[in-house]
Amino acid sequence: MRKETGMAITVLSAILFGIAPTILKLTYNNNNSSLNAVFLRSLVVLPFLFAPLHYKKLQIIPAREELKLIVSKAGLGLGVTGILLSASYIFIPVGIATVLHFAYPAVVALLGWTLYKEKLNPSKVIALVLCIIGIGLFFEPAGNLDIRGIILALLSGCTFAYYVQSLSKTKLKEMNLFRLTFYTNCMSTLVSGVAAGVSGTINFRLSMGTWLLLILGGIMVSLLGTTLFQLGVRSLGSLTASILSTLEPITSVVISILVLGETLTYAKWGGCIVILISVIYISLAETGKVRI
């Protein structure tokens, strides 16, 4: 796959992920908690993920070695990430939790450098620094922030970074994408379902409108967004894909303004601009149109 194509699908995945929070937020007014939303969003999309496996006659039950990878990487990476991030919303505002979560590109770079001896070329370092500055401009402390929420949000970034690195450094990168997306979503459904069950927040008695929003969000995130991002990591590598994915909070902000009527501060405008510069720069560097 050409790098231009890999960048395009990674950007598209970031846009899809960025739209999803507003869709989920619209369901919270209908007796639907954040944990229940994550669980049901993962659950309702399973038939859509199973269909291509059945149609293409692909192996449904994973081999033992595959199962170990799925549980250790997808279970911890995606499943636990959703729980940690959702739990952080209890203690700190969603916007601040999202910003803290997006420290994960830096964690991806750190894991690559320490565990896999990856060399960070100057272009990636510059793009990463710009990315961190841009995300930092979204941070707006609201009074006394609960340290528990901060820790949970940061940990969610760490577990997601662990999963992103696993996509490019383990045999997960060799697995059929349809199978990988199906298995990762199964793990997300299992982990979030257990968490929602323990917390007593599982609720299936929702309005038809809420169910339709959950199905839409599931297709956008669990089916399309996750598959495209995994393909982007295979094409570009974990760090470049992670930097491009920082378009997600920009998309989230724009959609929240258009749909929910939220406002945008000057600092957030600055953050959007810096992130866009970072994304444009890494895109030009990856295609050889700019060199350091």
Image (cartoon, rainbow, N blue to C red):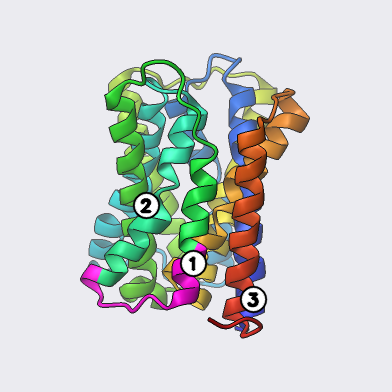
Which residue is at the front of the view, 154 or 82? 154
> Is 21 rendered above or below residue 158?
above
Q: Is residue 246 left or right of residue 68?
A: right
Farthest residue to the right: give it: 258
Q: Is residue 218 visible?
A: yes
Alpha-carbon distance for marks 1 and 2? Answer: 22 Å
Count the labels in the image.
3
Give the residue at mark 3.
284
In terms of secondary structure, where does tag 3 sit? helix
Alpha-carbon distance for marks 3 and 2? Answer: 26 Å
Which residue is at the front of the view, 41 or 238? 238
Which residue is at the front of the view, 242 or 290? 290
Q: Earlier in the sequence, mark 3 or mark 1?
A: 1
In terms of secondary structure, where does tag 1 sit? helix
In terms of secondary structure, where does tag 2 sit? helix
> How many other residues sit within 10 Å of disc 2, few (<14), some (14-19) or many (≥20)?
many
Q: Is residue 243 left or right of residue 151?
A: right
Residue 133 location, x and y as percent?
50, 49
Q: Identify the residue at image location x=58%, y=55%.
A: 225
Give the residue at mark 1.
126
Residue 216 location, x and y as percent?
66, 40
> How many other residues sit within 10 Å of disc 3, few (<14), some (14-19) or many (≥20)?
some
Residue 134 location, x and y as percent?
55, 48
Q: Identify the residue at image location x=55%, y=45%.
A: 45
Q: Is residue 72 magenta?
A: no
Q: Write the start and end of the magenta stretch as one range.
A: 114-127
Q: Identify the residue at image location x=58%, y=63%.
A: 228
* Quadrant hosting residue 4: bottom right
What amino acid is labelled 1 in the image? Ile
Q: Is residue 116 magenta?
A: yes
Give the residue at mark 2.
160
